[in-house]
């Protein structure tokens, strides 16, 4: 019994230290692009040696993935609240909130696109990334069902919709002919048009 409790305590301490590393990485991502943040810098922020950080994250990719998952999982709670009342949330409202979250949380969007586009993700990282992106596919599928779309079609349309929104943001986030605020306004305008296509054509709104 004592050995079991000791092992449990050691595991809790390990997870607590791992969480400190993740929070240190997120703090740095808030200051500059995540791809400019190295493992040594994260270790310094966490107050540990560079060698120690690899006990918790064997690779930089795994650290990025864990940080992304925590960040987007926390955000998903807000979207879940939007769907608590059946039919109360419009497709446009959901879409604007989704894209605004990504605009306001630049590091989250950067990590998401990195994980989307990178070749040869390790199996654990790919599995974790798939599970967290599934959250938003499921949320939007639920929203479509609330607006009357048959369940067998909702998942396919949710894939199309989420891909459309992220594609819009990728295309116009750093538009060379617009300042940042103008680019944001343009993105929101296109997101509204896209949302109307789903509302009017798919759901008969």
Image (spheres, grey):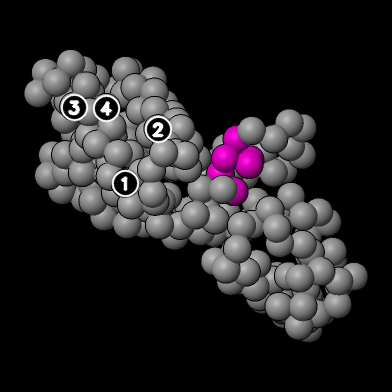
Please name the residue that numbered disc 4 is placed on. 194
Of callouts 4 and 1, the N-terminal one: 1
Residue at 16% x, 39% y is 90
Q: CA distance from mark 4 to mark 1?
A: 18 Å
Q: CA distance from mark 1 to mark 2?
A: 14 Å
Dot 3: element: helix
* Percent x, y of residue 78: 32, 57
Q: Nearer the viewer, residue 9 or 123?
A: 123
Q: Residues within 10 Å of mark 1 (few under 14, many from 20)?
A: few
- Residue, far left: 205
Residues at marks 2 and 3 touching, judged by CB atoms closer than 8 Å = no
Specify the label residue 193 is tagged with: none
Q: CA distance from mark 3 to mark 4?
A: 5 Å
Q: How many marks?
A: 4
The secondary element bearing badge 4 is classed as helix
- Label 3 sits on residue: 196
Q: Earlier in the sequence, mark 1 or mark 2?
A: 2
Between the C-alphas of marks 3 and 1, the distance is: 21 Å
Q: Nearer the N terminus, badge 4 or badge 2?
A: 2
Front residue of 77/120: it is 120
Find residue 94 and report its horizontal and vertical position in percent: 26, 43
Q: Which residues are magenta?
A: 111-116
Dot 3 surroundings within 10 Å: few (below 14), some, or many (20 or more)? some
> Which residue sits at x=90%, y=70%?
51
| C-alpha distance separating marks 2 and 3 | 15 Å
Residue 8 visible: no
Q: Are marks 3 and 4 in contact (CB under 8 Å)?
A: yes
């Amino acid at each position: 019994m004592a050995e079991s409790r000791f092992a449990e305590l050691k595991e809790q301490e390990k997870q607590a230290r791992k969480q400190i590393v993740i929070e240190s990485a997120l703090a740095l991502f808030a200051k500059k692009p995540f791809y400019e943040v190295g493992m040594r810098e994260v270790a310094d922020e966490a107050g540990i040696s560079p060698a120690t950080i690899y006990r918790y994250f064997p690779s930089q990719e795994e650290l990025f993935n864990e940080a992304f998952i925590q960040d987007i999982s926390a955000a998903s709670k807000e979207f879940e609240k939007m769907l608590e009342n059946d039919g109360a949330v419009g497709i446009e409202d959901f879409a604007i909130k989704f894209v605004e979250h990504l605009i306001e949380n630049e590091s989250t969007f950067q990590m998401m696109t990195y994980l989307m586009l990178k070749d040869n993700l390790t199996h654990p990282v790919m599995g974790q990334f798939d599970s967290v992106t599934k959250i938003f596919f499921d949320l939007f599928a639920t929203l479509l069902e609330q607006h009357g779309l048959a369940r067998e079609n909702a998942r396919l349309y949710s894939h199309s919709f989420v891909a459309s929104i992220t594609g819009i943001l990728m295309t116009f986030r750093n538009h060379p002919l617009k300042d940042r605020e103008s680019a944001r306004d343009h993105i929101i305008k296109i997101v509204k048009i896209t949302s109307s296509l789903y509302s009017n054509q798919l759901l008969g709104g």
